Every structure is written in C-alpha cells, then in structure tokens.
C-alpha cells in the first residue's frame, strides 16, 4: 500500500515555482543542490509526487545530498514517504548510504578530531533515520562505523560518544533480533560507563537500561527485564529527551504486564501514550510505538475489543508514515492479526485476522531472509487462524489442507524459536503448546498430550505455577482429556486449576473462563453429574452478565488524552510502590 500523503500545502506561488524547477530538473540539477535545505527538499518531494523515482534515487544515493535533506527535520514524515517509495521501487538507497558513510569513515580515520567528531554526529542522524525507517541492518552498519571512529581516541568526550553509539547500536540489534550481539553491545557500553566513572564523570543510563530491558523481554527473561526496567526508571531525570522517557516508560510497562503488575503497567503506558501524543503529535511513528504497547496491555488485561481498536490506529499511522513494504508496518499488521484472532475466536469469523497475518508475512519475507526470527511469530499467528478456519470447514479435503499448512507453519516457527532461544524458553514453550492444540485438531491425541505437557513443564519452571501462560496450557490439556481422551478426572482437576489462576489474575469476568466453564459443563454431562451441570450453567450465566458490564470505556484513546500526573510523579509513584514491595533494606 502506498504511503498516504500527509498535510503539506505550500503557498500557490511557491508551489508553482517548485513545479517550474522540477520541470527543468535535468538542466538545473546542480543549482538545486545549492538551494536552502527546505526548498531543496520540496523540489525532491515534487519529484516523488510525479513518480520520477529514478531521478530522485540518483539524488538520495549521494551522501552529501541526503545529509542536507536530513537537515529539513520538520519534513521528516514526508522524507519517509520518499525513502520508502525508493526502497519499494528497487533503489537500495539505505544500503548505498550506509556503505558510503562507512567508506567515508575509513577515509577520515587519520584526520583531525574535529572532522571525526562531525562525522560521528552525522552518523547518529543518518543511522537514527535508517533505524526509525526500519532498515536496521543498514543503521547497524552506520553505528558500527561511528563506534570505530570513537575508539580512535581514548578520552572522555569519545567515551561519551561511544556510550551513545552503543545505545543506538543496541536498539537496532534488538529490532533485528540480533540478541547475542546486543548483549555484547551492552557489555561494551558498560565498560565505557566504568571508564567515565573512574574519571569522575557520569552518563545517564536510562536509555541503555531501557534497551537492555527490551532485549531481555524479547528473550522472555521476564524477571531480569523487570529488574532492569526499575533501574531505567531510576535514571529518569528532568531534562532527559522526551523520546528516551517515552521509550523507558513503554518498556517498563511491558515488563510489568508479563509480571502481571497490571496497575503499574497501566499507569506507565497511559502516560507514555500521552507524552508521545503531546510532544510528537498524533501522526508520528513514536506515537504509534506507544499505541502498540498500549494495545499489548489492553490485550493482556482482557480488554480485547479495545486492543483491536488501538492496534488498528497504530497500523493506520504506520501506513500513513511509511506505507509500502516496511518492517514497522509488518509488525503492526501482526499485532492486529493476533488481537483480531482473539477477538473473533468465539464468532469464527477470521477473514480480517487472516488478512493482516498474511500481510505481515508477505512484507517480512520481501525484505528479510526466510529464516529471520521475526517470521516465527507471524507464522504462528497465521497457523492459529488457519487451524480455526479448518475446524469450521465442512469440506474434508480443504480441512486437511489447511491443517497441514498450519502444521508446517508451526514447525517452522518452533525451529526458528529453538535456534534463537533454545529449548528452555517461554517462546519455545508457546510453540509446543500451539502444536499440541493443532495435533488435537488433527486427531493425533498422544502427540497433542506430549506437546501440552512439554509446554506446561517449561512454563512452570520459568514463570511459576500460577502464571497466565501456565493456565492457558493447563486449560488446553484439560480440553484434550475432556473432549477426546475421556480422562475426565484429570480434565476436571486441570479445568479447576486454570479457572483459579484466571480468576486470581483477571477477576471473575475474565474471557478465558468461558471455555473452562463450557468444558466443565460438557464433562459433568458426560459423567452424569447433573447437579454440577446446573451449577456451572448458572456460573456461566453470571459470567455473561458480568462481561456485559465490563470495560464500559467507549474509546480507550479518550483515556489517554490527558494526564493527571507529571512525568516526575509517575516515576516517583512507580519507584515508591517498588520500595513498599521490597521493604526496607537490612
């Protein structure tokens, strides 16, 4: 999908002049480069509007030209449009710029410090743009070149620059799922922090700790992620860039969600959304970043309908900014696909969820290798959807084909997860659980039981006996025993355990309770315990009434348009709650 044009309406006379320059582009190309950056950019944007992408690509692939274009910072959204259009057109402008910058850094290695400092500063801008645009591999190349320049001088200024470079490098490696290299980058940053400390200097660690939190979260090391999010929150001070504050709040919120600290998560993510909207505006990619994490929170507190709406808004923003085959658009499609799948689960209408899952996979496979880890979650989501479509299908041949496709997708996702994280990981366990459900649909009951038990064992060891993920797998095993293996005693115990965990975490109105209640009604019917059948019919009716009253907020975005607390108050409230939990020091 092409990027949607944002509001950009120059004065008519000015626009006429720009059009005249573009009409004579071939003759005036050299003179165009001497224009002020804002005017020069407007000429290039007109080339983009007229579809003259080969000419535009010729300009943008020259480092000096693009450096000047980047200085028109108030037109960054429009630059993303042009850039993505070139990438979609087959002009590898991201890699050309990264390679050109890398060569320049090699040439100036022997130059004076001022030249190298200027190059590093430009590298931060160029790499930052490439990172924001989702071209993580090329941004990584730029930041590595900057880091190499920083290491040429062993003094305080360059240690500060090296720390900043490591933070940026860690961010793009996280985005590109290079977690092992990310860990090395964090250690390198720490070594520079130690050097600074020994010489009486301190660098703020909020951004670094926030990125480490993101890395640990991605690897499902939730306890460690939570610990580092606290450390990052302690580093938030007055004067810190808003982008850093927003990102730390986002990561801390996600860490709180997976630790089931929902009140803390809500306060943090709502303030992050508010800050991003106030500072960057409602069409900015940073605002969409916060919305995706807000959607994640809403989905995890069982406010599924609102999470779908929030994810859709985030996708709309990313499509308007980037459009085309962009990784940020792909991840938004995937998040919306999964939330739509959960939302539509009881209705069986999965067309919308399938559309977004397939769009995510199409984009990722177009721009990344076929074994990239980002494909694991997208394939998993599509497999879940295909399985449900197959179950509802009345054509046996179509059902078998869909189940086999889901099986292939699940196996591919499992292999990618095991390669990245190993056997003993929550993500790997999720894939085992998904295979267990699929095998049940394929009537391979022993294989299904084996997968569910494996998922439960891994999750229990990593997350504890009473985690949401454990409850999901326990409920799935109960369903297998109840509907297909006639192991009613085992099924009853598992259902009751799943219900207890769900109620404890989410309350009496938790959506997942419906499937456990219906499972118990079927179970008690099968064994002839009609008193229990009547009891759980009444419980299910009460649950339905409670669900009708729950989540009365009509629009989750209305909840974040204002904030009753300052950032300092939000941070202090979070840290104070931590101190109360931990108690006084010995």
Image: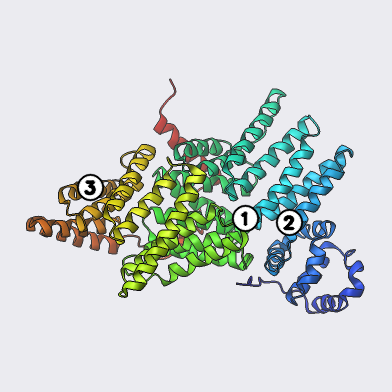
Q: Which of 245 and 172 is in front in this view?
A: 172
> Where, quadrant-wise, is the N terminus in this rendering?
bottom right
Q: Residue at the spot x=72%, y=48% of the render?
A: 141
Figure colour scheme: rainbow
Which residue is identified by label 2? 95
Q: For the residue labelled by badge 3, is the local secondary structure a helix, a strand or a loop? A: helix
Drawn side of residue 457 relative to residue 289, left or right: left
**Quarter assignment of residue 581:** top left
- Label located before the other in sequence (3 or 2): 2
- In the current view of this chain or complex, which residue is farthest to the top? 586
Q: Is mark 1 on a helix, strand or loop?
A: helix
Across and down, in percent, residue 288 comes to: 56, 59
Whether residue 42 is visible to the viewer of this picture, yes or no, is no
Looking at the image, is mark 1 or mark 3 earlier in the sequence? 1
Specify which label sits upstream in the sequence, 2 or 1. Answer: 2
Specify the label residue 463 is tagged with: none
Label annotation for residue 494: 3
Q: Residue 279 carries which label?
A: 1
The local secondary structure at tag 2 comes to: helix
């Amino acid at each position: 999908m092409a990027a949607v044009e944002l509001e950009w309406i120059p004065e008519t006379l000015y626009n006429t002049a720009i059009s005249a320059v573009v009409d004579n582009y071939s003759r005036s190309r050299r003179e165009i480069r001497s224009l002020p950056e804002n005017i020069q950019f407007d000429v290039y944007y007109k080339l983009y509007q007229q579809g003259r992408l080969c000419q535009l690509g010729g300009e943008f692939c020259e480092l000096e030209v693009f450096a000047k274009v980047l200085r028109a910072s108030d037109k960054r959204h429009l630059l993303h449009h042009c850039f993505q259009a070139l990438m979609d057109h087959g002009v590898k402008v991201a890699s050309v710029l990264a390679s050109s910058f890398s060569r320049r850094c090699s040439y100036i290695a022997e130059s004076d410090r001022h030249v190298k400092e200027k190059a590093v500063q430009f590298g931060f801008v160029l790499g930052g743009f490439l990172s924001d645009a989702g071209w993580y591999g090329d941004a990584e190349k730029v930041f590595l070149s900057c880091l190499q320049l920083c290491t040429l001088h062993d003094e305080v200024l360059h240690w500060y620059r090296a720390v900043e470079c490591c933070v940026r490098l860690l961010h793009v490696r996280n985005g590109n799922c290079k977690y092992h290299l990310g860990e090395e980058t964090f250690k390198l940053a720490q070594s520079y922090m130690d050097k600074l400390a020994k010489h009486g200097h301190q660098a703020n660690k909020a951004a670094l700790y926030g990125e480490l939190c993101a890395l640990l979260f991605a690897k499902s090391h939730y306890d460690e992620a939570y610990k580092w999010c606290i450390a990052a929150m302690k580093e938030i001070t007055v004067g810190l860039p808003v982008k850093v504050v927003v990102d730390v709040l986002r990561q801390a919120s996600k860490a709180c969600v997976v630790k089931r600290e929902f009140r803390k998560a809500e306060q943090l993510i709502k303030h992050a959304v508010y800050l991003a909207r106030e500072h960057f505006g409602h069409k900015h990619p940073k605002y969409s970043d916060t919305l995706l994490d807000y959607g994640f929170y809403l989905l995890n507190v069982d406010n599924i309908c609102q999470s779908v709406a929030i994810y859709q808004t985030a996708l709309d923003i990313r499509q308007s900014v980037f459009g085309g085959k962009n990784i940020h658009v792909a991840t938004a499609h995937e998040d919306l696909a999964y939330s739509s799948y959960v939302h539509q689960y009881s209705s069986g209408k999965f067309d919308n969820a399938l559309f977004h899952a397939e769009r995510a996979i199409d984009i990722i496979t177009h721009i990344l290798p076929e074994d990239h880890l980002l494909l694991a979650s997208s394939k998993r989501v599509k497999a879940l959807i295909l399985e449900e479509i197959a179950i509802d299908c009345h054509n046996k041949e179509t059902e078998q084909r869909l189940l086999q496709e889901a099986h292939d997708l699940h196996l591919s996702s499992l292999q990618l997860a095991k390669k990245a994280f190993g056997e003993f990981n929550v993500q790997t366990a999720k894939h085992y659980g998904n295979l267990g459900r699929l095998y049940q649909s394929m009537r391979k009951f022993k294989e299904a039981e084996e997968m569910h038990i494996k998922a439960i064992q891994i999750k229990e060891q990593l997350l504890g006996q009473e985690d949401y993920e454990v409850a999901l797998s326990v409920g799935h095993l109960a369903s297998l025993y109840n509907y297909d293996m006639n192991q009613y005693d085992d099924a009853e115990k598992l259902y009751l355990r799943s219900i207890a965990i769900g109620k404890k975490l989410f309350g009496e109105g938790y959506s997942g309770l419906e499937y456990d209640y219906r499972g118990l009604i079927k179970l008690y019917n099968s064994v002839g315990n009609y008193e229990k059948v009547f009891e759980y019919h009444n419980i299910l009716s009460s649950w339905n009434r409670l669900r009708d009253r729950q989540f009365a907020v009509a629009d989750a975005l209305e909840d974040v348009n204002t904030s009753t607390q300052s950032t300092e108050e939000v941070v202090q409230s979070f840290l104070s709650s931590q101190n109360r939990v931990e108690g006084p020091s010995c």
